Amino acid sequence: MPSTASPRALPRQNRGPAAAADNRKALIAAAREVYAEGGLQAPFSAVAKRAGVGQGSLYRHFPDRTALAVAVFEDNVRDLEEYTVPPDRTIDDLLDRVVDQAVVSTAFIELITADLSDRRVASLGARFQALVERLVARDRAAGRIGAHIETEDVTLATGMLATELARADPAQRPAIARRARALFAAAFAPR
């Protein structure tokens, strides 16, 4: 007689170390959801539960919230690096992507900016600075931005944009992004 038990009712097979990469990805995805819904007040354990992994797996991969935030932003920086490689990508494209990322990573922005001297955070900052440097040189050469604009101006603008979006009521985020983008466009324009 065939079993009527649902596949979900069967115990999960422990794949051990072979599941580590999948568990890590699941934890990062779950963290984005859990903290987007509940902010940093959401229990750390909720991440493991949402990912469908045990607490031990969570703590093996991410011993604290900062480690988890760094992993989320590692993915964000990697995405930005890949996204900005094509020669037609501009600072405007970067700002669009930062807006998209900030909306789903709002809770982590406060956490990751709390200790910019943390070596894990600092290395992400250096990678971001390198990609912005590339875009500034590209946009300056194409005449899309003024010679007065430095890499630090663009990194400051992206940080301000992400921080304001993180603090804003979700319904207000599109309007804030539009206003900030208009200010940056005016400030970055060739003179």
Image (spheres, grey):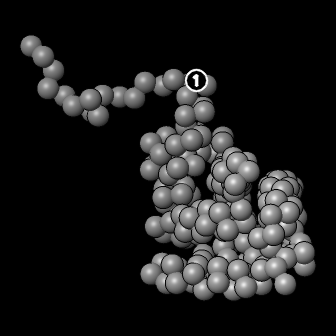
Task: In this rendered view, identify the residue nearer to me: 89 or 22.
Answer: 89
Displayed quadrant of residue 138: bottom right
- Can residue 138 be seen in the rendering of this structure? yes
**Residue at image coords 84%, 56%:** 134
Image coords of residue 52 (percent x, y): 44, 42
Q: Is residue 56 above or below residue 182?
A: above
Residue 22 lies in quadrant: top right
Q: Nearer the viewer, residue 5 or 106?
A: 106
| In this picture, residue 138 sits left or right of residue 170 | right
- Residue 96 higher or lower than 188, as above or below: above
Estimate the x, y position of residue 132 in percent, counting from the top left: 81, 61
Quarter that holds the N terminus? top left
At which x and y percent is residue 139? 79, 64
Residue 168 sits above or below residue 5 on the image? below
Vertical comparison of 186 with 27: above or below? below
Q: How many marks?
A: 1
- Kind of residue indicated by mark 1: Ala
Q: x, y (%) of residue 156?
A: 80, 75
Residue lying at 14% horizontally and 26% vertically, measured from the top left: 4
Residue annotated with mark 1: 18
**Label 1 neighbourhood size at 10 Å, few (<14), some (14-19), many (20+)?**
few
Helix, strand or loop for disc 1? helix
Residue at screen point 58% across, 23% down: 18
Q: Quadrant of residue 56?
A: top right
Residue at horizontal 72 percent and vertical 72 percent from the top? 158
**Residue 125 shows up from this direction:** no
Q: Quadrant of the C terminus?
A: bottom right
**Relative horizontal placement of residue 159, taking residue 5 as reference (left or right):** right
Q: Residue furthest left?
A: 1
